[in-house]
Image (tube, grey):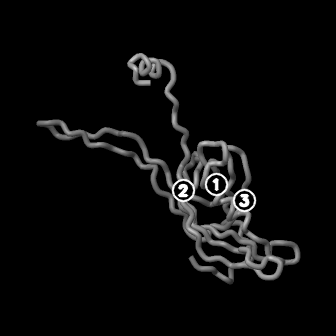
Amino acid sequence: MSINTAYAGNVNAIDLITLRQINPAGPAFRCHLIGDDEPTGGNARWDTLERPGRTSTIEYTGADLHTLTLPLRLDGFAVLPGGSDMTVEPQCAQLQTWRRPPTGTSQPPALTLDGPLRQPPYRPWWVITDLEWGEQVRGEGPLEGQRIMQEVRVTFLEHLQGEVLRGVTAQALAKAGLK
């Protein structure tokens, strides 16, 4: 990723993406989409079933989860009153925090994504699976050493809750001594 200096400080509402922690409810922030979003997955999965003495057949076994990779820019150039810069350290820290389960929980938080993205029409929840940090600009003066711009490539995986076995199935497993 390379920094487009002509872009620095220009806000384009068309490319703004909102990342919002949804489960559990939490913080949100906006950043710029600086390239093409890359959706993958969501495809049908098929297994080939061999049938001795006959032509093989296929069986539908489910669908893969969607993955979405976004090239993003956290931009604090000249956004405060008077045209002064703002640090993006809190947003960088938030991205890191969203990768791991919060203390006392078993999984990282789920997020929603809003903006001009090619995501499934049902607007799934997402979890972050990878961060690739790119170019950055550090501040001067009162923001000495702090990032005022950071590019990052974020990979999201569709978040679906697993189902818990209950009822007759769980009872049958218990009777068989398998639970």
Quadrant holding the C terminus: top left
The answer to whether any part of residue 123 appears in the image is no
Q: Which residue is drawn at the image coordinates 61% and 52% (left, top)?
A: 100
Q: In the image as oriented, which residue stretches furthest toward the left?
A: 53
In-image side of 17 versus 170 (left or right): right
Secondary element at image label 3: strand
Residue beneath label 3, please? Answer: 29
Residue type, mark 3 in image: Phe
Q: Residues within 10 Å of mark 1 (few under 14, many from 20)?
A: some
Residues at badges 3 and 1 in contact (C-beta under 8 Å)? no
Residue beneath label 2, please? Answer: 129
Where residue 169 sits, quadrant-wise, is top left
Say whether disc 3 or disc 1 marks the residue closer to the N-terminus: 3
Secondary element at image label 2: strand
Q: Is residue 66 above or below residue 165?
A: below
Residue beneath label 1, please? Answer: 98
Residue 15 x/y as whole percent = 66, 66
